[in-house]
Image (cartoon, rainbow, N blue to C red):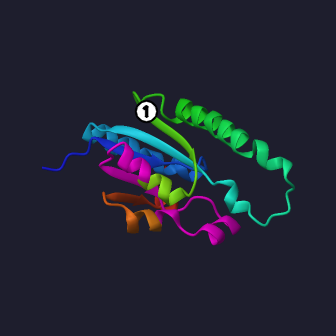
Amino acid sequence: MIEVKKILFPVDFTSNSKKVLPFAKFLAEKLGASLHLIHVVRGADDFTGFDMGAAWFATFEEKVIEGAEKTMDRFIREELEDVPDVGRKIIMGEVVEEILQEANRIDADMIVIGTHGRKGLEKVLFGSVAREVVQKANIPVLTVNPFKTKA
């Protein structure tokens, strides 16, 4: 018998996350599963070679994590007020690696992820997170194209 007790939902706080969220909420509700959110902040290593001076690095991680925590609070308050006991994680690192590690850490049974997040140069530089998660995950991954939803 297949049991889905924990669903991991990576969020990037774009409008696309809000379009995919109803699928994660629906599955969690229908399957009696808990919903766990993760937001991965790209590390300062992604800016190697950028001419930004030395001073910015000292507060980079602290300020970015602090901002992400506030955004996660708002996202949960606005989008998940009707969902009890939502798990949450903000972490800095390589996005795909951190998503997969969190899935293992919480013993997730499924990942629900949008196929389109950030756009433009960032997508070109960092590739498709959803594609890599599907390829590397050892649990089922539901991908949702936010441009094909009615939300």
Boundaries of the magenta span? 101-130
What secondary structure is found at the residue carrying circle 1? loop
Q: Nearer the viewer, residue 32 or 70?
A: 70
Q: Position of residue 81 (x, y in %)?
A: 48, 28
* Residue at image mark 1: 86
Residue 64 quadrant: top right
- Is residue 140 at least partly visible in the picture? yes
Q: Nearer the viewer, residue 13 or 37?
A: 37
- The answer to whether 18 is drawn above or below residue 119 in the figure is above
Give the left or right position of residue 96, taking residue 140 as reference: right
Q: Residue at x 63, y 37 (%)?
A: 71
- The answer to whether 2 is drawn above or below residue 75 in the figure is below
Give the left or right position of residue 133, taking residue 68 as reference: left
- The answer to whether 110 is drawn above or below residue 47 in the figure is above
Q: Amino acid at mark 1?
A: Val
Q: Position of residue 147 (x, y in %)?
A: 52, 61
Residue 92 magenta-highlighted: no
Q: Nearer the viewer, residue 17 or 125?
A: 125
- Is residue 23 at least partly visible in the picture? no
Residue 59 quadrant: top right
